[in-house]
Image (spheres, rainbow, N blue to C red):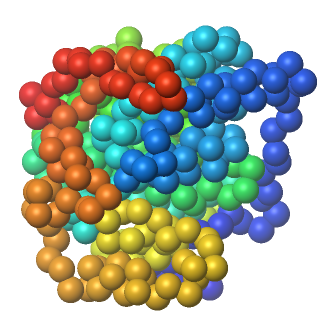
């Protein structure tokens, strides 16, 4: 019997994702995209280089996901990966300080807990629990949660399951269509092949217009993964499905315990970076003390300011208030990368 505030960190017994296999032709294209990606990487002297390398090269499936998303068209794969490389350099999703996001997590409006029958981590979204005003930090919190879902993925699993539960949601708490469009843009362009299933439950009739409004911005692949009010017990083991939507797990959300379990399992430092699984990292207790100290001693941050900017991310605070609405162009030259100026709009508008 697990505690009611337990966060599942692995799939149910017997659930074991299997590795993907590729034809020789497909593998050749993946390898070619990987070699191309090396030519647009930051120089090793750049402070963000290790984070870019970890996402782009240490994850051996990264280029494969972009080729699948591009339907095995190499030039399209290059364009897609260019856009995400540029976005990650600007937005730095892997350098979001946990403490800056804690206030957004206190109501349990987005919870990471449990795995489906294929080993996908489950991200619950409950708009009815919205606890803050519309701001760029809300989007940043969602991206933080997407990154944590990726951290939870077991070997050979590359996607997540999202369950949107509209219980108690009102017109006031539901996100605007413009915000939803921005979120869809980020998910579809920069987290390619990361959405395995998208489930919507308890949708009130008054919000049907919301899905009609965002439908034109759903690409066919995303639309095919959406299901409304399915039998969730066919998709999620009962032991890991929240009892409020038909499962056996009587989960009780407790903000402090939840946050500590997430930060600990994901091995996050205070600046949002990871403590990598290396001998040095395993013996370096100082980083762990910094992260745990931040959890227990600091008050929740009300906003992202320059004083909270992590050392490895000098522009994180100034970038936090903007989202790139157009895919930046990355120009390859002598293995260096330049980002061409483009229009940006604030999320608050």
Place of residue 329 in the rendered image (x, y in percent of width and height, measured from the top left): 38, 17
Place of residue 129 in the rendered image (x, y in percent of width and height, measured from the top left): 24, 55
Residue 260, quarter of the rendered image: bottom left
Give the residue at x 69% y 49%. Answer: 157
Can residue 342 be seen here?
Answer: yes
Place of residue 302 in the rendered image (x, y in percent of width and height, measured from the top left): 10, 62
* In-image side of 345 versus 55 (left or right): left
* In-image side of 139 versus 223 (left or right): left
Q: Is residue 276 above or below residue 53?
A: below
Quadrant containing the C terminus is: top left
Give the residue at x 16% y 25%. Answer: 345
| Front-most of residues 77 and 182 | 77
Q: Is residue 62 above or below residue 210?
A: below
Can residue 251 be seen here?
Answer: no
* In-image side of 38 versus 205 (left or right): right
| Front-most of residues 278 and 160 | 278
| Front-most of residues 173 and 205 | 173
Give the residue at x 70% y 44%. Answer: 60
Q: Is residue 285 above or below residue 327?
A: below
């Amino acid at each position: 019997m697990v505690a009611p505030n337990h966060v599942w960190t692995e799939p149910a017994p017997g659930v074991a994702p299997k590795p993907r296999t590729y034809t020789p032709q497909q593998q050749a294209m993946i390898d070619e995209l990987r070699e191309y990606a090396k030519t647009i990487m930051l120089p090793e002297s750049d402070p963000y280089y290790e984070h870019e390398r970890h996402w782009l090269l240490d994850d051996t499936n990264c280029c494969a996901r972009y080729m699948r998303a591009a339907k095995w068209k190499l030039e399209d794969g290059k364009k897609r990966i260019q856009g995400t490389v540029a976005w990650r350099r600007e937005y730095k999703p892997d350098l979001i300080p946990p403490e800056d996001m804690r206030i957004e997590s206190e109501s349990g409006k987005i919870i990471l807990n449990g795995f489906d029958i294929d080993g996908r981590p489950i991200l619950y979204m409950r708009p009815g629990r919205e606890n803050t005003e519309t701001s760029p930090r809300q989007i940043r919190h969602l991206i933080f949660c997407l990154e944590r879902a990726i951290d939870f993925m077991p070997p050979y699993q590359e996607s997540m399951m999202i369950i949107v539960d509209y219980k108690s949601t009102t017109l006031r708490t539901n996100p605007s269509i413009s915000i939803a469009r921005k979120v869809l843009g980020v998910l579809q362009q920069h987290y390619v092949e990361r959405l395995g299933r998208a489930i919507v439950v308890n949708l009130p009739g008054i919000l049907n217009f919301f899905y009609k409004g965002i439908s034109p911005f759903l690409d066919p692949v995303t639309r095919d993964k959406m299901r409304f009010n399915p039998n969730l017990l066919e998709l999620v083991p009962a032991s890991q499905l929240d009892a409020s939507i038909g499962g056996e797990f009587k989960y009780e959300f407790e903000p402090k315990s939840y946050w500590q379990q997430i930060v600990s399992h994901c091995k996050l430092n205070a600046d949002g970076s990871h403590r990598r699984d290396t001998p040095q990292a395993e013996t370096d207790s100082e980083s762990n003390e910094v992260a745990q100290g931040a959890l227990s001693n600091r008050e929740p941050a009300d906003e992202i300011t320059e004083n909270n900017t992590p050392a490895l991310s000098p522009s994180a605070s100034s970038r936090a208030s903007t989202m790139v609405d157009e895919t930046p162009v990355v120009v390859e030259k002598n293995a260096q990368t330049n980002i061409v100026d483009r229009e940006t709009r604030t999320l608050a508008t």
